[in-house]
Image: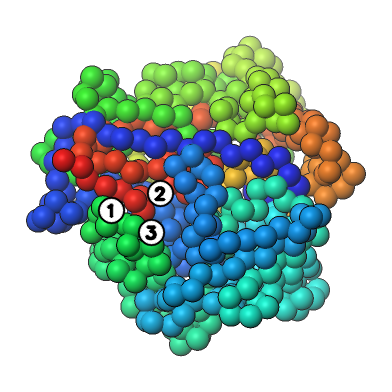
Amino acid sequence: MKLKRTVSVLLAGLLIVGCGSGGEGESGDSGNSVVVTIESDLNTMDHHVATDGTSFIMQSMCIGGLAALDSEGQPIYDLAENWEVSEDGTVYTFYIRDGVNWSNGTPLTAHDFVYGWRRLNDPELASEYAFILETIGVKNAAAAHKGEVPLEDMGVEAVDDKTFVVTLDQPCGFLLSLMSFPSFFPLNQEFFEAHEATYAQSIDDLLYCGPYTFTKWEENTEYTFTKNPEYWDAANCTDDMDEVVFRFVSESQSAALAYQQGDIDAVKLSGDLVDQYKDDPGFTQRLEGFAWRVSINQQQESGIFDNLNFRKALTLSIDRDVIANDVLKDGSVAAVGFIPMQFAFGPDGTDYRDTAGDLLTFDVEAAQAALEEAKKELGVDNFSITLLYETDSEAPGKVAINLQSMWKENLGIEVTLLPKTKKERLQMMNNLDYDLGLTRWGPDYADPQTYLDLYKSDISGYNGAYFNDEFNALMNKAETGEDSTDLEKRWADMVEAEKMLLDDVAMIPVFQMGSAMLINPNITGIEFHSAGVDSYRHIKRVD
């Protein structure tokens, strides 16, 4: 997730207007409530700790950033009423709106952004998203995170209560788009320090400055957001829903039935349900920016995953088309590289995938040959490995079962499946307590760097299991070095970097996520973004 130079091409978001058979949500009795299912439970409301899409969506409902994204994925003013960029692109000046208050009546100020950005970068917090300050090139961000300079030396400053200035080491063409991302949201210092021990653990331990406030928190069940009359743009949000309920339903069949009964307004479909409902007038599909992969723990004690031929055997033996087309059936497509398609576009406007080409193949004979070489090199005849996956939704389990079957049938490798909740899976992977882990990445901005930097081991907060100095050097050349100001050279560097990762089987891409949904015909205003956070802020019900 980082990039410290231009190439600011945002993939257009998709504004979906549903047309299904669902009815009004049961949480409201006046038609001013809407119920949306979520397939992964809320992980945290602390926007400096969160790493998952569900948490980001809910944080975006009730807090806010300097900018928001419109339905086309372009940055628009939110808590900032205006901004200026210096001629050399290294100084951004944001002007905070008058009359913007936190939910306790305290005025929002530029100091809240300074405090929030410093907390994000605080090495004691050890936020996994601290690196994103380096991504946009904030001056001294890396040194401050390493403890080499004080956090006060970061390039963020409140000139006065209404003026927030960000100083960069070099230009960043997508900085404004990232101002809508929750990691960059403000934090009120006085409130945080008064609630530090329990911050973001309950409704009363949060402050709100977004279009909604968080009014009902039922863990593992549902989360209710109620329209905020004090929101700066409340006068223009009169048609938005008074109440938005996110209901956690892990089993899509139950969710689909609730939709048919009128208890739910929007639901994702998977597997056979796609075939069952594809002719329903409320059915819609889209290709998302999320890319699923098998993460490989090369630091695992047995050492087998440190063997290149063993990793090659695993990736070559996967029939990705079967997984996407026959198992998922929801619009997902087989991965042909690490970077997804229809997501990022180069200086000449060409889709990155068209430039980089197809880098993955299904070749059982080659996979078996690689496995034989691995056996010789490792002095091992039989392998037994574990695949970690999450159970919050159905798709990961289905994919895991098929991977297990393919590795058994094509390679004779015994694979033990390890199902965990998403929260547990994330923790285990963060602690490197796994062999293989089925995981995904949702892009924060529309550039290949948001993916490639996942394997850049010299960045702040890196806790992965892959280390490649040659890859780091190439990415540094593209991000901050000699190629950073030449868009074509930078793009070529990233194409080369992706190929380097896949030649080395740093990970095993499996599929690019599609989404099949049923959406109530009376619901509009859901904004899905291929990069960034999906928005339910302006969801409406029409007659």
Say which residue appears at 34% left-offset and 63% top-offset: 234
- Give the vertical position of 133 relative to 204 (above or below): above
Mark sitting earlier along the chain (1/3): 3
User: Which is nearer the eye, 16 or 479?
Assistant: 16
| Distance between mark 3 and mark 2 Cα atoms | 8 Å
Say which residue appears at 39% left-offset and 37% top-offset: 15
Residue to which mark 2 is pinned: 535
User: What amino acid type should be assigned to the residue bearing mark 2?
Assistant: Ser
Tell me where residue 415 appears, x and y as whole percent: 49, 34
Q: Name the image quarter holding residue 380.
A: top right
User: What amino acid type should be assigned to the residue bearing mark 1?
Assistant: Asp
Say which residue appears at 43% left-offset and 58% top-offset: 60
Local SS, label 1: loop
Local SS, label 3: helix
Residue to which mark 1 is pinned: 240
| Distance between mark 1 and mark 2 Cα atoms | 13 Å
Instruction: Pick out the residue farthest to the top.
Output: 365
User: Which is nearer the eye, 460 or 445?
Assistant: 445
Mark sitting earlier along the chain (1/2): 1
User: What amino acid type should be assigned to the residue bearing mark 3?
Assistant: Met
Tell me where residue 329 appears, x and y as whole percent: 37, 23
